[in-house]
Image (cartoon, rainbow, N blue to C red):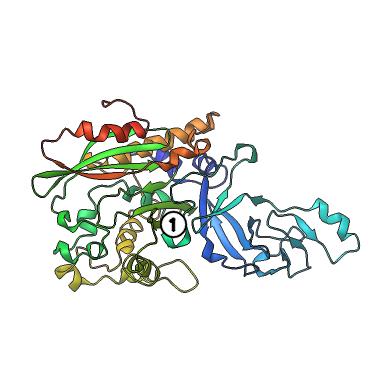
Amino acid sequence: MLSKEENELLTRTGPGTPMGDLFRRFWLPVMLAEEVPAPDCPAVRLRILGEDLLGFRDSDGRVGIIDPYCAHRGAPLFFGRNEERGLRCVYHGWKYDVEGNCIDIPNIAEGASYKKKVKLFSYPVAEKAGFIWAYMGPHEKQPPLPKFEWMDLPRSYYVVSKIVSNCNYFQSLEGSMDPTHGSFLHSTPDAAANPMGRLGLFDTDNSHRDRMARYLRVDDTAYGVVGVVERNAPNDRRQVSINHWVAPTFTPQARGSGSLDLGYMRVRVPIDDENSCVFRIRYDPRQPLPDRIRHEYNDGDFLTPELIPGTYWPVANKENDYFIDRFMQRNFTFTGIKSFPLQDIAVIENQWGPIADRTREHLVASDEMIIRVRRHLLKMARDLGEGIEPPAPHRPELFATQPITMRLPKDAPVEEAITPHLVAAGVGEIGR
């Protein structure tokens, strides 16, 4: 468990907080490109890391993330006219470009000269892989973009999505480092009936037969943490997965667990301390995605739940108990909650409230990677407070690390199989 002080440090990411300062050293996805789909489209309100912002795409297709209020008298630029390479305030006509520069003040005679003295704060922006990225830290500390393998893929090779939930970012993040919850939360009595298996994203031959998982080792790395977990597999074999947490909240999913062998990553980004969003990308680095996967993410209701129109909040939510179906729970699924992500959201949103009280928990061996990630994040935030910068942002190649799942004979030397992957992750020799 954590102390109250440690939990506060871990979960608070607003301006001026230690963890907030750490997050602001990294490039983060802050919205989907589809939220600003075309030049001169309506501006979009954003709230990221406790800051209220505004995103818009100008006439040339460039995206800006700026102060949401006009510098003149604080009118909301959300209602502004997006036209002719800038966003014009409807109150008095002051106009701003994507970098926050005031480019027109039409209501005073001296506007042409006075506009040079006016500038809204703005953040550096990049558009990659269907996401709009922002760097919200000190200008002089700005790193290059991370080099995930999916950053420059053709659009047909990936699908992206976004879901908002009413809980702190770390409650969502912990689920990706929990190797046993899927054997319960996402299970079905008949493994072959699991939709993940039908989609080719999950190996139903081993679906939830061994509900225990054992960490063989967990190590700190320059990019975050790597964990090696083992579970029993059919036919007298063992399944070994090498999983990664990439600071501050990137969690790639191990390949080799389904017939399609697709890449998958989730990124949890704090909206504020009590709300967060998860950005997801499913991709194939070799070829376009199958239509059934694209359909399920765009129009299905299992991998992406139905969302309230105009938002990224699920229709099934805390207020309606996620439409839990007790008949389905008794007979067909472990939870009775239909959508795969909602099964997670139902747990994390109600886990001792929007900010979980980790002084009350009882951790066990299957929580080893969660414990290590907490320690790593806390250390990074404390180090930054003492002037020690995190190394990963300025080493973009570190973000290309790849998780993997292997099936091995029971008597196979595991160390021999995992050593090359750990060496690639920068761990070095086997042994703690």
Which quadrant of the figure has residue 365?
A: top left
Q: What residue lies at 48% left-to-right and 44% top-to-bottom?
A: 147
Q: What residue lies at 15% left-to-right and 56% top-to-bottom?
A: 205
- Mark 1 neighbour class, 10 Å CA radius: few under 14, some 14 to 19, many 20 or more: many
- Tell whether 311 sits left or right of 300: right
Q: List x then y, in percent, for residue 185.
A: 23, 58
At label 1, the amino acid type is Phe
Which quadrant of the figure has residue 333?
A: bottom left
Q: List x then y, in percent, for residue 350.
A: 33, 58
Q: Is residue 162 visible?
A: no
Which quadrant of the figure has residue 314?
A: bottom left
The quadrant of the rendering that contains the C terminus is top left
- Residue placed farthest to the front in the image? 287
Number of numbered callouts drawn: 1
The quadrant of the rendering that contains the N terminus is top left
Circle 1 is placed at which residue position?
A: 279
Q: What residue lies at 17% left-to-right and 69% top-to-bottom?
A: 332
- Tell whether 368 sits left or right of 115: left
- Tell whether 286 sits left or right of 211: right
- Tell whether 100 sits left or right of 249: right
In this rendering, the answer to whether 256 lies above or below 380 is: below
Q: List x then y, in percent, for residue 11.
A: 44, 46
Q: What residue lies at 28% left-to-right and 47% top-to-bottom?
A: 178
Q: Is residue 205 visible?
A: yes
Q: List x then y, in percent, for residue 275.
A: 45, 57
The residue nearer to you, when weighing 132 against 389, is 132
- Element on which disc 1 rests: strand
